[in-house]
Image (cartoon, rainbow, N blue to C red):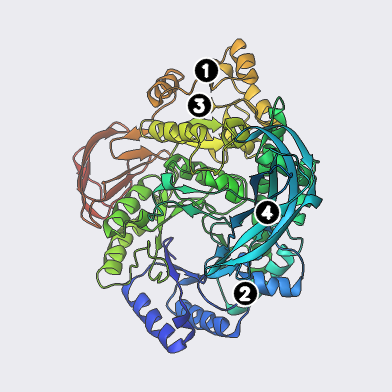
Amino acid sequence: MNRSIMYWKWDNDVLDLSVLDKKTDDLLSRTQIGNIFIGTQWIVDRFHGEKLGAAFRRVIERLHAAGRKAMIECCIRNEGEPFYRQYPGEPSYLLSFYECEADEHGAGTFRIPHEPVWHYWRHTGDGGEHKLFACYRLKKTGAFSYSSAVRCDGIAASRAVKAGEGYEIEISFTGAEKGESVAVCVGFPQPIVDLAHPKLLPYFRTMAEHAKELGADGVFSDEWGYDMILKIVKPNPYDDTELNLRHISWSEHFESKCLEYTKRQLFDRLLDLFYTKDGEAERSKEAVDDYLRTLRLLCTENEEGMYETVKEVLGKDAFWGVHPTWWGSVDSLNFEFYKNGFYWWDAKRDYAQTDETILYCIRTALAHRFSAPVWYNMWYSMGTRDINTYYTETWRNLRYGGRTHYLGYECPNEAVVLELKPEGMLESIEEMDARVRLFDGAGAVQPDCRLLLLFGYEAVSNWADIGMTMPWKPQNPRLDAVLNTANAVFSEVLCDLVPSYAAENASLFVNGRGRAQYGTQEYDAVVVLYPDGMTKAAEDFVRALPKDRLVLCGGGALQEELCAAGAAGREDIPSAAEIVSLAKGMGVPANRREGGVLLQDGSILFTAEGKKHIKNPLSLDFVWQGKRMRFEGFDALWISQDGTRAVYPEGTLTADGKTLSSEVTL
């Protein structure tokens, strides 16, 4: 079975089995891709529904008969309605604070927009549903600062008021002092299952058992995390600078998880997530750290619980996953902290999985963490709907140890996604992927990234420390510095980008040779970006590293301590060029050739730029293991460590003038 993946997002028309059969015939006749992922976010039927079950059974039987594997969406977040019928209770909410200044009578009335919460076609809010959680009287000293706050929940009331086709929430209060700001915390219910609900995993087990009954080879759940309310300021959803959000997720069960993970309550500190008290900035920083830690560990616990369930129910070889990344951008990932705590490096998986333009140094890091032969990146053209982007992405992915998760054969409800079903498109993907599949054996090895870029999770994520503002944007200055610097370094020296919390789960450690190691990857040097505020486990990891192979950047007490002990340091985040220079000075090899990279097993892999789906010219002349290698051909070339074996789809390779044939052919 080949490693390639094609996504097929269903619409309700496939519930007509005659329609489903025609589409399945078409897909199977036009591609040999071995793994078909079936997405059902847009299907108006529950996972255990009779019609959806019949469609699943039919397509799984057809795929198996054709020698393919079938992975089906098994996302408990889609099951909010049936879940809460079985387990009645409060959902999770998206909370934010809203303000009004008291008049001369200490009273006031104001309205805020009602915020429906959407999860694909599912949503809440048709009746103006909301909840008033808390009320404070504030003496404001700035937009997000105050000198005193008094909790006074009893002075405020709220009601939903019809406004056009939707609702507004009218809030009234009395009993304040003239000129005080009254800040109310309002929540809007989410349509998904609360991720902190204690019955989440038992319910998920029933879904996994149903998937086994259906005959699925694996299951998946995309973009894990709570729902968000994104405000699009301008119509283009891929213009990152024109989006914002202002809510955090909370529930009674989330509160219990916060107490479990941090030993502190969160609810009475909700104000600290949005405002800072004069002279007590640490209070807000601590509250934000606790919130993000809870969200991150909760999503990790969810993922690992689902992983173990799938392995127990469907078998150890069953697939579980699909990308945890949500905002698949090269440098605009601030929203990930609010979605799922940026937990990507934490949860156990079989394969590293990302989407769109996530940095290659993150993709390789995750692949090293999970010890998989390949990683996957879901591609849907960043909204360009340009088939040529699939070609460039796929050949570049091959170079760096990855495969493209093609989205998708069909995707009828998402306008930004290019459907590959039209005549000619799927054929071009198949022709290209047939060549990529030649490298599923010998060439399926990860790049040898000898430099670790470790970023301080707390310093990069804590919005109270960076500057308390609202609404929040898709970028923050520290995260920008980390991502843009790492991206530029990777273009010169192969490196992995890893958060400091990896030292807490022991996936990042100092090995017996005294070197940092992450999963299967050992590093010759470590550069720490923003070390201030890291947890004790992360600090202890950094302290244990050899000082002559350590650079700390961004300042703080730990940096001062270790620089005094012999480590190098920079008060600011240096340029990528300076980091590259420092790395090479510490003996870190770039492990790059023009168009190629060195792999962990000592072999080397080259790819062309991929402007076309196939027959991208590749001309090479270099010395490898003392042999003069000359290649004239197309698309890609792999050569073993000893220079005696090779894989390429088309061309001529000579080693010291002797022809070296590809060990696999089209």
Instruction: Report the disc number at residue 571.
Output: 1
Say what amino acid the circle numbered 2 marks: Lys
Task: Place residue 566 in its image quadrant.
Answer: top right
Q: Which of 183 and 516 lies nearest the eye of the viewer?
A: 183
Q: Is residue 455 left or right of residue 484?
A: right
Q: Which residue is under mark 3?
A: 524
Instruction: Report the disc number at residue 532.
Output: none
Q: Is residue 90 left or right of residue 563?
A: right
Q: Are marks 1 and 4 in contact (CB under 8 Å)?
A: no
- Label 2 sits on a secondary structure element that is helix
Please determine whether, in this image, residue 228 is positioned above or below residue 660. Answer: below
Q: Which residue is under mark 2?
A: 212
Say what amino acid the circle numbered 3 marks: Asp
The alpha-carbon separation of the residues under discs 2 and 1 comes to 55 Å
- Badge 2 crowding class, 10 Å Cα cut-off, few under 14, some 14 to 19, many 20 or more, is some
Percent x, y of residue 250: 70, 53
The alpha-carbon separation of the residues under discs 2 and 3 comes to 45 Å
The alpha-carbon separation of the residues under discs 4 and 3 comes to 50 Å
Q: Which of 567 and 13 lies nearest the eye of the viewer?
A: 13
Q: Sequence order check: which comes first, mark 1 or mark 4?
A: 4
